[in-house]
Amino acid sequence: MYSGRLHEWQGMDLSISQFNTLVMLKQMGSMRMGMISYYLKNTLAATTSIVDRLEKKNLVVRTKDPEDRRVVICELTEEGQKATERFWRVAREAALRVAGKWDQEQLESVVNALELILRTHKEIVQSGVSSRANE
């Protein structure tokens, strides 16, 4: 069952950038193309190409901002929502199977490592935000 669903996800033929775009839209909701480009650290042209491909797969849709027609807003389609939910469900199941093999001490070590990663990531993000604010 698990491998079948993983194969289904892999069959979508997504690049890492396309996958990251889907995940970001799932977490943040609809976004301006410029913000997607900023967060992915891509040019607007590269982001447009990524979104073009996702739109052809019916995973995202672009609309004009009603307040500013120059602005393009991108959001997940219903199929895009389902695809990302399917991916996270498969990933959760895999993580639970792996964690089920560990004893309490090993689980605590993993949790501590993940907390360290999260703290470090927050520090990096904060330092990036403060340095941009000073520019």
Image (tube, rainbow, N blue to C red):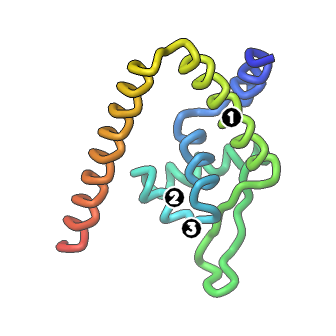
Locate residue 93 relative to residue 33 in the image: left or right.
Answer: right
Quadrant housing residue 14:
top right
> Of the residues shown, which amino acid type is indicated by label 1?
Phe
- Residue beneath the point at 19% across and 72% down: 135
Upstream in sequence: badge 1 or badge 2: 2
Of all residues shown, which one is farthest toward the top?
101
> Of the residues shown, which amino acid type is indicated by label 3?
Arg
Q: Is residue 54 above or below residue 31?
A: above
**Residue 32, numbered circle:** 3
Locate residue 86 relative to residue 104 in the image: left or right.
Answer: right
Pointer 3: residues within 10 angstroms few (<14), some, or many (20+)?
some
**Residue 36, numbered circle:** 2
Secondary structure state at the residue bearing disc 2: helix
- Residue beneath the point at 59% across and 75% down: 71
**Residue 87, numbered circle:** 1
Mark 3 and mark 2: span between their CA atoms? 6 Å
- x%, y% of residue 79? 81, 47
Pointer 2: residues within 10 angstroms few (<14), some, or many (20+)?
many
Of marks 1 and 2, the one in the foreground: 1
Locate residue 123 relative to residue 4 in the image: left or right.
Answer: left
Secondary structure state at the residue bearing disc 1: helix
- Residue beneath the point at 36% across and 44% down: 118
Q: Are marks 3 and 2 in contact (CB under 8 Å)?
A: yes
Of marks 1 and 3, the one in the foreground: 1
Secondary structure state at the residue bearing disc 3: strand
Q: Nearer the viewer, residue 119 or 53?
A: 119
- Residue beneath the point at 39% across and 51% down: 41
Pointer 1: residues within 10 angstroms few (<14), some, or many (20+)?
some
**Residue 62, numbered circle:** none
Q: Nearer the viewer, residue 70 or 96?
A: 96
> Of the residues shown, which amino acid type is indicated by label 2?
Ile
